[in-house]
Image (cartoon, rainbow, N blue to C red):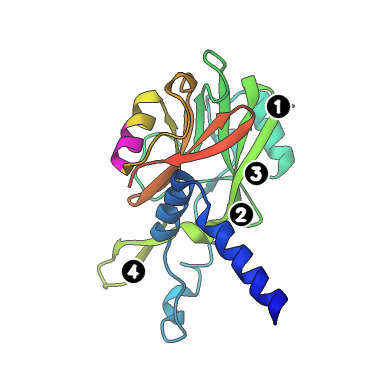
């Protein structure tokens, strides 16, 4: 029994030494996601409303501003781009910003494949240089967004990407009430706001080749 007890103690120490900001961001996003249904509630969370088949997914060619070389790369990768339930005059989840250094124009795309979406960041707009981060099942981002005339749940997809600049990062960090985990001088480019629409978000920020998770909106 001694080895099991030792493993338990080591695991407890590892959990309690997580960085406060990363833990807070992860906790906020986890709290925003719907809880698993109990056995008695299971019928509500089954069927086409909840299995992801009704999520609106656009082909990469449906984004007029996206360079043709990136459209072809996304098509070759088998990507579609899921759309959130929030009304928008333009297609969502394809954004442009400077995510590595000031003045560099990068593209970030929410790529859905086989029911899982990840953020693909194409550096300097190159179809041959990209990073992939934050993969999550699409069904994790389904929530009830209203009721129809018959009183039935309306279920909508809720993952939404945005560009987070210096002021947004500082405002979100101040609202979170924790010290910024990087020096202010390092906030010289933009982050990717990864939101559970209407609930919470986290900000992916590249620092020395590593993606950090900073507090987003709450």
In the image, the segment drawn in magenta is 171-175
Q: Nearer the viewer, mark 1 or mark 3?
A: 1
* Label 1 close to label 3 by CB (< 8 Å): no
Please name the predominant secondary structure of the magenta segment in the image. helix
**Residue 173 is covered by the magenta coloring:** yes
Q: At 46% across and 18% down in the image, what residue appears?
A: 185
> What whole-number distance in Å separates the C-alpha atoms at marks 1 and 3?
14 Å
Residue that label 1 marks: 127
Number of labelled discs?
4
Q: Earlier in the sequence, mark 4 or mark 3?
A: 3
Residue that label 3 marks: 79
Q: Which mark is residue 116?
A: 2
Q: Nearer the viewer, mark 1 or mark 4?
A: 1
- Residue 33 point in image, percent of width and height: 43, 60
Mark 4 secondary-structure assignment: strand
Mark 3 secondary-structure assignment: loop
> What whole-number distance in Å separates the C-alpha atoms at marks 4 and 3?
29 Å
Mark 1 secondary-structure assignment: loop
Is residue 194 visible to the viewer in this orientation of the structure? no
In the displayed structure, does residue 165 sit left or right of residue 186?
left
Q: Nearer the viewer, mark 2 or mark 3?
A: 2
Q: Earlier in the sequence, mark 1 or mark 4?
A: 1
- Residue 14 point in image, percent of width and height: 58, 57
| The N terminus: image quadrant | bottom right
> What whole-number distance in Å separates the C-alpha atoms at marks 1 and 4?
40 Å
> What whole-number distance in Å separates the C-alpha atoms at marks 2 and 3?
10 Å
**Residue 182 is covered by the magenta coloring:** no
Residue that label 4 marks: 153
Q: Residues within 10 Å of mark 4 (few under 14, many from 20)?
A: some
Q: Residue furthest top?
A: 103
- Nearer the observer, 62 or 146: 146
Q: At 26% across and 72% down in the image, what residue appears?
A: 151
């Amino acid at each position: 029994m001694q080895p099991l007890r030792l493993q338990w103690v080591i695991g407890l120490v590892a959990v309690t030494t997580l960085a406060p900001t990363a833990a807070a961001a992860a906790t906020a996003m986890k709290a925003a996601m719907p809880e698993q249904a109990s056995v008695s509630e299971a019928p509500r969370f089954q069927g086409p409303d909840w299995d992801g088949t009704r999520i609106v997914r656009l082909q990469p060619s449906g984004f007029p501003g996206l360079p043709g070389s990136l459209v072809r790369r996304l098509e070759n990768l088998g990507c579609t781009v899921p759309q959130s339930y929030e009304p928008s005059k333009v297609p969502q989840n394809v954004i442009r910003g400077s995510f590595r250094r000031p003045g560099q124009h990068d593209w970030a795309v929410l790529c859905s494949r086989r029911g899982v979406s990840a953020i693909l960041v194409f550096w300097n707009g190159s179809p041959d240089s990209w990073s992939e981060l934050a993969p999550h099942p699409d069904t994790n981002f389904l929530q009830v967004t209203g009721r129809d005339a018959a009183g039935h749940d309306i279920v909508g997809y809720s993952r939404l990407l945005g560009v987070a600049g210096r002021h947004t990062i500082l405002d979100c960090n101040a609202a979170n009430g924790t010290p910024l985990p990087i020096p202010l001088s390092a906030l010289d480019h933009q982050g990717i706001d990864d939101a559970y629409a209407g609930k919470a978000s986290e900000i992916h920020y590249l620092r020395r080749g590593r993606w950090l998770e900073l507090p987003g909106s709450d």
